[in-house]
Amino acid sequence: MASSAQARDDDLVEEQPRPIIVKKVIVSGGDGHHGGAWKVAYADFVTAMMAFFLMLWLLGATTEDQRKGIADHFTPTLVKMRAGSAGADGLLGGSSITDVDNYPNAAGQTGTKSITIPRDATGGPREGTVASTKTRRAEELKQRIDEKLAQSRSLHRLARQVRVMNTTRGVRIDLIDDADFSMFSLGTTVLQADARDLLELVSEVIEEGDEEITIRGHTDALPWRPGVVANNWSLSAGRAEATRQELMRHSIPVDRIHRIEGVADREPLIADNPEDPRNRRMSITLNPAGEALR
């Protein structure tokens, strides 16, 4: 009997339910896909896409004049425009600031609505300024000199000795010596035969103009022989005077000669080698009458 009772007690113990244990795990940090930062980025993206498609729609649904008006509407300007003339009249109305204005202009003159620049006053080459006139004059002289040199059997080899450029003083023609060519006999103001022919050619090119002429003589920095009573200042000035006389012999009026100058070796063409023969040169500068430096 005792063993039977013991067996029943063991069965009751086994039939009792086991306790349920719930383990709660808390993970801290990181919102994962439940955070809010992505929403801000997505909203910015949607806004940008909406603006992009709005721009595409405007480009396809408006005319060229309307698009110019839109561009002007969103472009700030400090220039106060005349009513009914420039800029946009409303978002989709008006015309562009770059259209021809309705200000009273000279016949055929155009300008922008922000500012109208009279011709021959100031501005770039298209407005016909003095700078652009000098540039065209330099190109014209260079072309004519090159053509005459090419036509001359004796002088075509001297094309590299002639340089024409536009400077702040005017159109300058440089006649440059080198190791194989010298305009003057060494240490003198006596012109060589080729130099006389070259100056005659230059005279034929510039005689048709009315510019004032400045002649400037340059020397190299080679030292003089001991005992020689001379210097580069007097030599450069004397060579400028010899050049003036040669130009006058070939139809250049005396009243066109504005000035002659001798600057010795103070303005070398080859600055890092003052003794280079290319520093010996004659510069003939043409300036519109009344504009030469005083």
Image (cartoon, grey):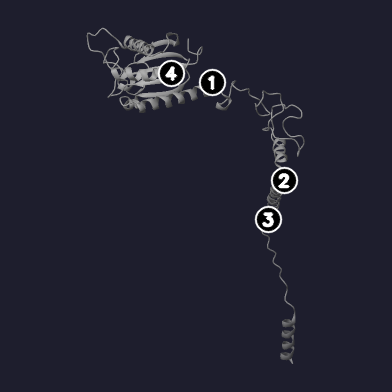
Q: Mark 2 or 1, which is nearer the eye?
A: 1
Q: Is residue 24 shown left or right of residue 294?
A: right
Label 2 – label 4 distance at C-alpha:
60 Å
Task: Say what amino acid the circle numbered 4 marks.
Answer: Ile
Q: Mark 4 or 3, which is nearer the eye?
A: 4
Classify 174 as above or below 53: above
Mark 1: few/some/many CA within 10 Å (<14, 14-19, 20+):
some
User: Mark 1 or mark 2, which is nearer the start of the sequence?
Assistant: 2
User: Mark 4 or mark 2, which is nearer the start of the sequence?
Assistant: 2
In which quadrant will I find the N terminus?
bottom right
| Residue at the disc numbered 4 | 206
| Residue at the disc numbered 2 | 58
Label 4 – label 1 distance at C-alpha:
18 Å
Classify mark 4: helix, strand or loop. helix
Mark linked to residue 196: none
Classify mark 2: helix, strand or loop. helix
Residue at 72% over, 43% down:
63
Classify 279 as above or below 44: above
User: Mark 3 or mark 4, which is nearer the start of the sequence?
Assistant: 3
Classify 257 as above or below 113: above
Task: Say what amino acid the circle numbered 1 marks.
Answer: Val
Label 3 – label 1 distance at C-alpha:
72 Å
| Residue at the disc numbered 3 | 31
User: Mark 1 or mark 4, which is nearer the start of the sequence?
Assistant: 1
Label 2 – label 1 distance at C-alpha:
45 Å
Residue at 73% over, 47% down:
61
User: Mark 1 or mark 3, which is nearer the start of the sequence?
Assistant: 3
Q: Mark 3 touching mark 1, by CB under 8 A?
A: no
